Each structure stands twice: as structure tokens, then as C-alpha cells.
Image (tube, grey):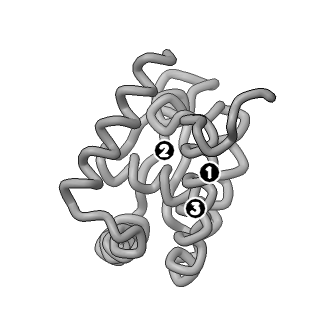
Amino acid sequence: MGPELDKQVCYALYSTSSQVTQAYRSLLEPLKLTYPQFVVMMALWENDNVTVTELAKTVGLSKSTMTPLLKRLEVLGYITREFELGSERQKNVALTALGKSIASDAEIVAEKALCATNLSNEEAKQLISLCKKVQQALV
């Protein structure tokens, strides 16, 4: 009766995401980051000094979710938030020297997290590709 749980793509993604996020928790502790904060930092390491709106779109979070997250990153000294020149509403987010300096530590975290999954680099690429395919289909 009804769909079988272990045959649902949605459940496989949901449960796996939860376990991966959990695995990151202890790895991110030394950097004082939560997983969502880590995602934001990764986006900034790729593209620094962006508006909150751009950053929210990149990481797939709402602006209202971003505000407390960014405040915490600012308190940690990893980012600054300043009003965009000529705008009293739009803020730009930029990495500080400290925020840039932890990028190499974050690389190690990402490598350890990948190792914990027991996926090869090729399998990881395939999984990422499939996830992107699902995302694009659902947009």
C-alpha cells in the first residue's frame, strides 16, 4: 500500500543529505562553522564581494535565512557586510583576510568529508552531475 520508502529518489536524497551534513559537523567545528555557513563561505571563496541577493541565489537560501547566518559569519570575523555604493537597501558581502585565510583549512575539510563517503572522485562527479540534472528538471 503506497510507495515504498527505499525506492523513492526524494527519500534517498533527503536521508543522504542529512547524513552528509552530520558528517561535516565535527569537521567544521575547528572553523566554528555550521554546514550552511560553510556553503556560504565556499560560494564567497569562488566569487567574493557580491550582494546578499546574489549570494542567496547562488547557495539556494532565502534572504531572510541569509541575514542571521551572515551576522554570525561577521561576528566570527570571516566577512563584512556593507551597503552597496549608491544603495541604502542592498548590502555587499566580502571576505575578510581571516575569511580568506581559512580557505585552505576548508579544502582539507572537504577532502575528509569526501573520503568519509567512500566515493571515488569519478563517483563523486557522477553523483554531482545527477543531482544537478534533478535540480534543473525541478526549476
Q: Which amino acid does the dot numbered 2 rest on?
A: Val
Circle 3: element type: helix
The residue lying at 53 percent from left, 70 percent from top is 24
- N-term mark: 2 or 3: 3
Residue 116 against residue 135 in the figure, above or below: below
Instruction: Find the distance from the CA under tag 3 to the CA under tag 1.
Output: 19 Å
The residue lying at 59 percent from left, 63 percent from top is 19
Q: Could you tell me if the residues under marks 1 and 2 are in contact, i.e. CB atoms within 8 Å?
A: yes
- In the image, farthest residue toward the left: 122
As drawn, the label of residue 11 is: none
Q: Position of residue 139 (x, y in %)?
A: 49, 16
Q: Is residue 118 left or right of residue 81?
A: left
Report the residue marked by disc 1.
70
- N-term mark: 1 or 2: 1
Q: Which amino acid does the dot numbered 3 rest on?
A: Thr
Report the residue marked by disc 2.
93
Report the residue marked by disc 3.
21
Q: Is residue 62 left or right of residue 110?
A: right
Instruction: Find the distance from the CA under tag 2 to the CA under tag 3.
Output: 24 Å
The residue lying at 56 percent from left, 52 percent from top is 17
Q: Decide which of 95, 139 is in the foreground and name it.
A: 139
- In the image, farthest residue toward the right: 1
